[in-house]
Image (spheres, rainbow, N blue to C red):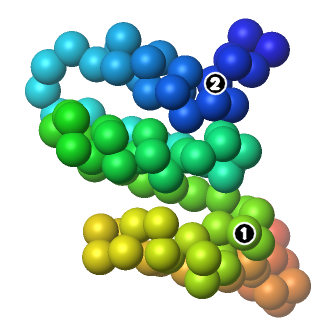
């Protein structure tokens, strides 16, 4: 509840800006799609601060072709697939 107001991109930007002092920052966002117009905040971080930005999520919206249009030419996509059942069982054999 403490951060519920950050579901607006302007509030998210103001909050993170207040935490940034100087130097390089690494900004990590998970499930950013819940923030309305999130791509505006991400673009502002990219332009205004010395930072690397990482966006993760499990929502299918993030995996859609629409997502890539938000950050065209400015992202590297790394797809991670879930473990198969056999892969899940292997570490248990090591115990």
In 3D space, how far apart are the residues under numbered discs 2 and 1 (Cα atoms)? 20 Å
Q: Position of residue 18 (x, y in %)?
A: 36, 11
Q: Residue furthest left?
A: 23
Q: In the picture, residue 19 is in which quadrant?
A: top left
- Residue at the image position 14 percent from the left and 19 percent from the top: 22
Q: Is residue 85 visible?
A: yes
- Between disc 2 and disc 1, whose residue precedes? 2
Q: Position of residue 47 (x, y in %)?
A: 21, 44
- Residue at the image position 55 percent from the left and 46 percent from the top: 38
For residue 6, the mark is 2
Q: Is residue 26 visible?
A: no
Q: Nearer the viewer, residue 73 or 53?
A: 73
For residue 61, the mark is 1
Q: Position of residue 29 (x, y in %)?
A: 53, 44
The relative height of residue 15 versus residue 42 in the rendered view (above or below) is: above
Residue 61 is left or right of residue 86, and the answer is left
Q: Are marks 2 and 1 in contact (CB under 8 Å)?
A: no
Q: Quadrant of the C terminus?
A: bottom right
Which type of secondary structure does the marked residue at label 1 adopt?
Answer: helix
Residue 95 is left or right of residue 79, and the answer is right
For residue 78, the mark is none
Q: In the picture, residue 35 is in which quadrant?
A: top right
Q: Nearer the viewer, residue 86 or 32?
A: 32
Residue 3 is left or right of residue 79, and the answer is right
Q: Position of residue 66 (x, y in %)?
A: 60, 76
The relative height of residue 66 versus residue 84 in the rendered view (above or below) is: above
Q: Quadrant of the N terminus?
A: top right
């Amino acid at each position: 509840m403490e951060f519920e107001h950050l579901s607006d991109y302007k509030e998210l930007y103001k909050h993170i800006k207040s935490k940034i002092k100087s130097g390089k920052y690494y900004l990590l966002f998970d499930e950013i799609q819940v923030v309305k117009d999130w791509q505006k905040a991400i673009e502002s971080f990219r332009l205004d601060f010395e930072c690397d930005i990482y966006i993760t999520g499990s929502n299918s919206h993030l995996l859609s072709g629409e997502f890539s249009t938000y950050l065209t030419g400015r992202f590297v996509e790394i797809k991670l697939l879930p473990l198969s059942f056999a892969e899940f069982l292997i570490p248990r054999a090591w115990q």
